[in-house]
Image (spheres, coloured by chain):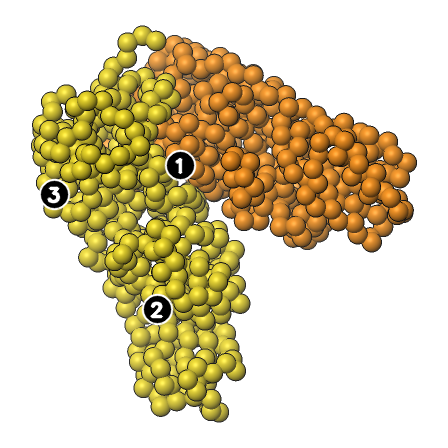
Chain colours: A orange, B yellow
Amino acid sequence: MKHMKQIHIGIIGLGTVGTGVARLLVENSDVISARLGAELVFKKGADLDIARDRGMNFAPGVLTTDPYEVINDPEIDIVLEMIGGIDLARQFICRCIETGKHVVTANKALLASHGNQLFRLAAEKGVALAYEASVGGCMPIIKTIRESLVGNRIQAVTGILNGTCNYILTRITREGMSFEQALDLAKAEGYAEADPSLDVDGFDTAHKLAVLSAIAFGMEINYDDIHIEGISEITPMDIEFAAQCGYAIKLLAITKFDGQSVEARVHPTMIPLEDMLSNVSGTMNAVTVSGDAVGDMILYGHGAGMMPTASAVISDVVDIARSIVAGGAMRVPVLSFRMEQIRKMAVKPMDEIFTHYYFRFSAMDQPGVLAKIAGILGDHDISIKSVRQTERKLNGAVPVYILTHQACEAQVKKALAKIAELEVIPQPPVLIRMEAPEEEKAQQQS
Amino acid sequence: MKHMKQIHIGIIGLGTVGTGVARLLVENSDVISARLGAELVFKKGADLDIARDRGMNFAPGVLTTDPYEVINDPEIDIVLEMIGGIDLARQFICRCIETGKHVVTANKALLASHGNQLFRLAAEKGVALAYEASVGGCMPIIKTIRESLVGNRIQAVTGILNGTCNYILTRITREGMSFEQALDLAKAEGYAEADPSLDVDGFDTAHKLAVLSAIAFGMEINYDDIHIEGISEITPMDIEFAAQCGYAIKLLAITKFDGQSVEARVHPTMIPLEDMLSNVSGTMNAVTVSGDAVGDMILYGHGAGMMPTASAVISDVVDIARSIVAGGAMRVPVLSFRMEQIRKMAVKPMDEIFTHYYFRFSAMDQPGVLAKIAGILGDHDISIKSVRQTERKLNGAVPVYILTHQACEAQVKKALAKIAELEVIPQPPVLIRMEAPEEEKAQQQS
């Protein structure tokens, strides 16, 4: 083989993903070079702990504890920020961009909080800031939206983007265990952190959604505008009832754009069993993108893990390397739309959204209770699709399950507050939003 | 908005897909320009019938009946070949490439038969020959394999790639109708051609598989080496039994590479219901790509249809346009691997493959029949996983269903031929290959 151009890679942070990337660069260098036509050389890796056994051998001088040995190395073309966290990561990335280095990151928390500034800086300096691995692990959701769906007006992106939550919901569904039991299991299996809040309270999913709605609709990243609810209130009882009605409960990231206003929300959602997303189990992730030309398209794959995430990082590295080889970076705008086209767009307040709802009330077992509930719902323009009352008693009360047609969130909140005040309703009502089955979606549009 | 660069597009063939592309170029020109930073101008469209109402207005002089008005227009940068068929399409594409025009096509039959020469010609002339829409409709399977999985050794690609077949199998599964009834229904719904052979006999699926195995493994396109079976022999009886055992029957395109030899085959396949592909219904398509880093990743979407296919064509057009704007075409090698890396690779003869099998025998209702069948299977190293015999009689015989562990195709054929000779087996045996559930796959690998 004739002498190939070398492109030098530096990695800051040799934790799980950083080590996975280093492994792929070495172990799969033959297939990468055969596809790229250049050689990716892992020149320097910085980590506070360079003594730890990472299951591979590094050439002498490759490892360092000083990230600035990577950042200031004039030979390094592309730096991979793999440390996570906000402040240091941001500082390192800014420094790389300012010195004209291309950057690859998987840091969704950083992009959600400081993405707008970082992307603007990268565009000004004419370097790439790539982030495929920040959303959906190995799934090429960023590339698909930015490149493959370039001819579409994107209408919605709906995804299962957190493996920890999906694992917990899968366990509750299959074994009927409580949230707490399932969380303990997730911790034991290594799928949940000691402090699980980032995952189970929906923040991680919202970080990813902030990036997706930006690139889908041409808007600035707007993490603070996202409505976020986690999965800690989900019970086996609700999941069981959902299943009986033909639904699964998943933590969904949902963003929609009707040409006027954007919705962006993360919450447990009942989705029809005929929707492919309902079959996504365990730690797997999946995203549905809806565009005016493609209809619904789904990507499915490992949303996290050493090698799947490393695969996504390498795809970014090779994309940048191809532009270095071909002599023109910044081929695809970082946020899909050209910088000057990106608008600040307001997200619709939750009170204004219309969707379908599932309610569970704990009602005293007395005649006339259902009439009262139905009356209050009717007074708030909430039309009931189906009702079920069971014999099973919970602290002396029986559960009443209600599915609604499309209703307005503000009205729903008012109605539930009124119902909660009834003496015959001893416990606060449960609310889970639903995505309608296809045929109802079609009816709504017509 | 400041004056943008214009890139001129010509379309040869304004049938369904060609018209869809023209519509997207006009109706979504605002979002396309906002993402691309250049304007795509539909300059000329050639079709034998330019009088037909296509639901849109064309500027004067855009339509012509002479394809060479498109090919010879020096201002046109990218030509879309949308006529289908082999000879004329090939002639037009060669002429475009020779005059330095980039080409986009959705013509899988042409690529399967003449792709190697066309791709070589394009590489020589330094122009793009893009074909995302040739496989899987709107799904970005070509881009995903070529770009997103660039860091992986690809191990297998398994897909439902023909909407007509999947529609027919879905109808047989759901309504228990015969193949013939389901085919008639598909024709009535516009999902099958008057001559359905290209679809139902598996040829269209094999055209697509030829392209996928080439880009997955770095081999020349090898349509003639693919083993092809269609779905016309599938009966509701087999589908019903499969469902009882936890399987669905789908027409799968399967290609695998273990580092030594390639498998490439199209045939009806029993897949476990926990496999996401088993839930792909109606005319939808889906592909699983397995790579050493990503594990299994799935794309799902509309495999055909005017606008989904047009969306894929536009993604190719914009990719090429970005390279024109940035000043460097041929960024990604056409067949994923650089031309000089692409090898002629032999496909393993069917006789040498190992897989799981389902057999259905029609047996006379006599004692000792099962012992005879089992004896012959055992003599050929075919290990039985489960057997079921039902009471239901078909022309005086009862069906005997057998699922096997992994066995060698050559042995299976020999065994079935021997069993067919038995006097107690009045009808030819039925054979359907199976993909094993995950846990068995894991066992086999360990």
Which of these two is toward me, B296 or A384?
A: A384
Q: Which residue is mark 3?
A: B88
Q: Residue furthest top?
A: B2
Alpha-carbon neighbours of circle 2 within 10 Å: few (<14), some, or many (≥20)?
few
C-alpha distance separating marks 1 and 3:
29 Å
In the image, what residue occupies the spot 35% across and 13% down? A126
In the image, what residue occupies the spot 40% across and 19% down? A337
Q: What amino acid does circle 2 point to?
A: Glu
Which of these two is toward me, A128 or A375?
A: A375
Q: Which residue is mark 1?
A: A294
**In the rendering, at what x and y percent does residue B286 appear?**
40, 48
Q: From the viewer's perspective, is A390 left or right of B157?
A: right
Q: Which residue is mark 2?
A: B233
Q: Chain of mark 3?
A: B
C-alpha distance separating marks 2 and 3:
35 Å
Check chain identity for marks 2 and 3: say if they share one.
Answer: yes
Check chain identity for marks 1 and 3: say if they share one.
Answer: no
Q: Are marks 2 and 3 in contact (CB under 8 Å)?
A: no
